[in-house]
Amino acid sequence: MNLSTRYLGLTLNTPLVAAASTLCGEVGAIRRLEDAGAGAVVLPSIFQEEIDHELEEVDRLLAETGAEALSYLPPGLADLGGPEGYLKLVRRAREAVDIPVIASLNGAAQSGWVDYARQIEQAGASAIELNVFYLPTDLSLPGVEVERRHIAILKAVKGAVSIPVAIKLSPYFSSVGHLVGELDRAGADGFVLFNRFYQPDIDLEELKPVRDLRLSHRGEIRLPLLWIAALAGRVKGSLAASSGVQTAAEVVKYLFAGADVVCTASALIRHGAGYMKTLLDGLVADLEAREAASVDEIRGRLSRASVAEPEIYDRANYMKIIRTGHTAAGEL
């Protein structure tokens, strides 16, 4: 059975991608993911703000106490000299596995994106995923300016490197499709839909905002599934589905919608790197049951452009559901 796929111009053995998480920050785990069937891995994000803070701390200590201060820095910080720890991970991962190693870059200023993107390419990354985690809490900032920032970041990075560049977006735009189209025309090699914002909660005992990690659940597949289906066949860039993947069923659904690859992190965090084989075995079993000889035979068959009634993805479907009162079991 042919499970290979094309993503960002790269050939992957399988359409399963280990999304950015702490699990992908250790070479041993990356090897296990490859052995379990991952077609590619996305390394944890390198955050421009963290690196800048660490470098500022080095400069401050050197200014206050001289060169001997380097011996008192936290482990690994003394020889950081920029994003060296992350670049070392990129180099070691590329040496350890044969599958593509995609670096994830999360920046705040355009200069940071470009500088670190160049260094990541030099370290040997197969591609770069721009993780645009930007919350426009400035109420005076118009939506069009937020979109322009995304496009400007993409163009700046594309102009600085020669490896493929994907952009990971949030769903919180007035017109996701239009923005993806603009980014596609600006040269994006692929789109990861969608980024999950880790939003704060409120501790009623301590009366303060708190942050915690909530892993995704299969119900979160709905929104990215809709947009993957809507965009499949209509953009040049690759489509990567993200969020809600817990079993092989979600993988198959995303492929039917038109995804080139399917990313998962939460399921791997819950069950370990070896769970990738469970997802792969489930995918193979589903394809065999459908007598499909390859992933390409099912990809996009249920995209908006391929179904007989495309309005099922639109407002008409909403109206039918409301009128008939149909509600999925367990979602009341």
Image (cartoon, rainbow, N blue to C red):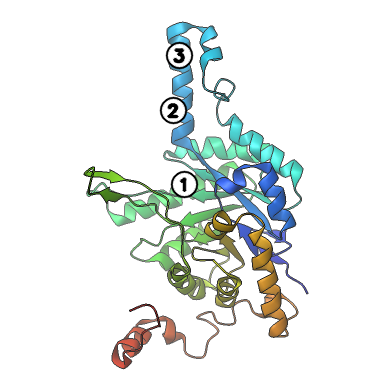
N-terminal of the two: label 1 or label 3? 3
The residue singled out by tag 2 in the image is 53
| Amino acid type of the residue that numbered disc 1 sits on in the rendered structure | Ile
**Mark number, residue 295:** none
Would residue 204 be seen by someone viewing this image from the given angle?
A: yes
Q: Secondary structure at mark 3?
A: helix
Q: Quadrant of the C terminus?
A: bottom left
Q: Quadrant of residue 290?
A: bottom right
User: On screen, 91 above or below 141?
Assistant: above
**Mark number, residue 153:** 1
| Amino acid type of the residue that numbered disc 3 sits on in the rendered structure | Leu
The percent coordinates of residue 87 (x first, y second) are 63, 35
Comparing 76 with 115, the one in front is 76
User: On screen, 105 above or below 65?
Assistant: below
Mark 1 and 2 residues: CB-CB less than 8 Å, in contact? no
Label 1 vs label 3, nearer the camera: 3
Residue at figure coordinates x 33%, y 51% from the top left: 145
Q: Secondary structure at mark 2?
A: helix
Left or right of 28, for residue 216: left
Disc 2 versus disc 3: distance between alpha carbons? 12 Å
The percent coordinates of residue 194 (x first, y second) are 46, 61
N-terminal of the two: label 2 or label 3? 2
Residue at figure coordinates x 56%, y 13% from the top left: 71
The residue singled out by tag 3 in the image is 61
The percent coordinates of residue 315 (x first, y second) are 34, 82
The percent coordinates of residue 325 (x first, y second) are 31, 89
